[in-house]
Amino acid sequence: MAPAKPMDIIILGGGIAGLTTALSLTKFAPSSSPPNITLFEIRPEPATIGGAVNLTPNALRLLSHLGALDEMRAKNYGAECLAVEVYDLYTNAKIAESSFRGPDGKGLGDPPFTALRITRGEALKGVLAAIEKHNNIKLICGKKTIKIEEDDAGVSIEFEDGGSARADILIGCDGIHSVTRLKHVEPERKALYSGICNAFGFAPRRKISSGDFEPTHFSVSGMNFGRRGMLLTSFHDPNQESIYVGALMQVPEIADRNGWKAAGKDADKTRNEMLERYAGAANPHIAHWIQDAQGLYLWPVFTLSKGGKWATDRVMLIGDSAHAMPPQGESTGIVFEDGVLFSRCLAKWIDTRRQEGVPVKEAFDAYERLRRTRIDTAFDESQSVVKTVQDTPWLGHKIKMNVVPWYLWWTRAYREKHFVEDVTCCDIGY
């Protein structure tokens, strides 16, 4: 039997989710027949909104497999994070930590990885550098999709500028407000405001009279719990010259998207609210970092309801477009896992079922069977984040400061189980 024609695949969304999915599809495809992948991005150039993320050991392991971690390390992006330290804002006492050191201090898993605190922008640059090494992947920016149609032979899309494209399958990696979901897969499943916002910016470190940097209470990343939110203070570059300041806090809903945009851009108002919310901090430097934060932005956290529809016969949703949830420490790693596991299921279908005329939906279904339970569990865990950052009275805060260390100890084995996991070689049951 003659070899099958390489698959044509469209990915909507040129962010980290779409790009890493393209790398995964390329890596796990038959070497003799890599797919032709075209990513369409609505923005005029690759970009990402957000602050600094912590790439946990499982996320770094996958980026290493995909060739992107080498690109990030070559540019010296990010700051190695051995642990996220947890503090009581009002005493500056360290009450717990979530460690990535592993049993011998070198990291978790085989090979071992720690974690990397990195800006979303630098993470995107590293993935783009890996993409450039693959001739089968093409990224086209400035394309707004207005229509998606599928038939027995493939998927067609139309753009606002009058252009169109067609492929064998389409993968929606276009985020919480996914056009793929809202125009085709499940239009009635809308984004829901979680009740919390992330206010973030980057503060250049002040220097003291000796010429040294102002000291920090954390080694690399410190999570500071207060009565009216949770404040992350973290280095994100190897020279530790800048501090990422990210505040998760309860904020009343604003009626429309334009209202949120206006609120997000009002840096002075956001700064004043942060200073008020985190007033009374035992460490005076916390106020300095909020005062000095540049590019301060307020970002509402939207989520999707649990469950939902992920696929049609030829269209699949990946990442936030399928299961956006509040940040719970490993959200980025979950997205990378999505792309790898979906790609492995699709590769198995190409190798064993495509030539027999079995519909590609079989691979989609195999991926969903493999992934649903893990995503449902992560969703349930994420709800605790919303509760943790809600405004609370003094007694509630005291109780929280006693519960958090116990919770981190109790769940340590569960977290480390996922940190050492390598989904590039696990059994996919298909």
Image (tube, rainbow, N blue to C red):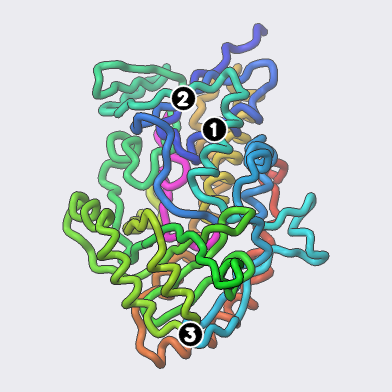
| Mark sitting earlier along the chain (2/1) | 1
Tell me which amino acid carries mark 2: Leu
Q: Secondary structure at mark 1?
A: helix
When the figure is inspected, residue 152 is found, relative to residue 244, above or below; the finding is: above
Prevailing secondary structure of the magenta residues: loop
Segment colored magenta:
309-329
Q: Which residue position is annotated with label 2?
A: 139
The answer to whether marks 2 and 1 mark residues whose Cβ atoms lie closer than 8 Å is yes
Mark 1–mark 3 Cα distance, whole angstroms, equals 42 Å
Q: Which residue lies at the image location 32% right of the left edge and 66% below the top edge?
A: 271
> Any mark on residue 182, and which?
none
Of the two numbered discs 2 and 1 in the rendering, the one whose residue sits closer to the viewer: 1
Tell me which amino acid carries mark 3: Ala
Q: x%, y% of residue 121?
A: 48, 44
Task: Estimate how packed mark 1 is, as few (under 14), some (14 to 19) or many (20 or more) residues with alpha carbons within 10 Å.
Answer: many
Q: Residue furthest top?
A: 2
Tell me which amino acid carries mark 1: Leu
When the figure is inspected, residue 52 is found, relative to residue 424, above or below; the finding is: below
Whether residue 262 sits left or right of residue 238 in the image: it is: left
Q: Which residue position is annotated with label 3?
A: 282
Whether residue 348 sits left or right of residue 284 in the image: it is: right
When the figure is inspected, residue 247 is found, relative to residue 92, above or below; the finding is: above
Q: Which residue lies at the image location 45% right of the left edge and 54% below the top edge?
A: 51
Q: Secondary structure at mark 2?
A: strand
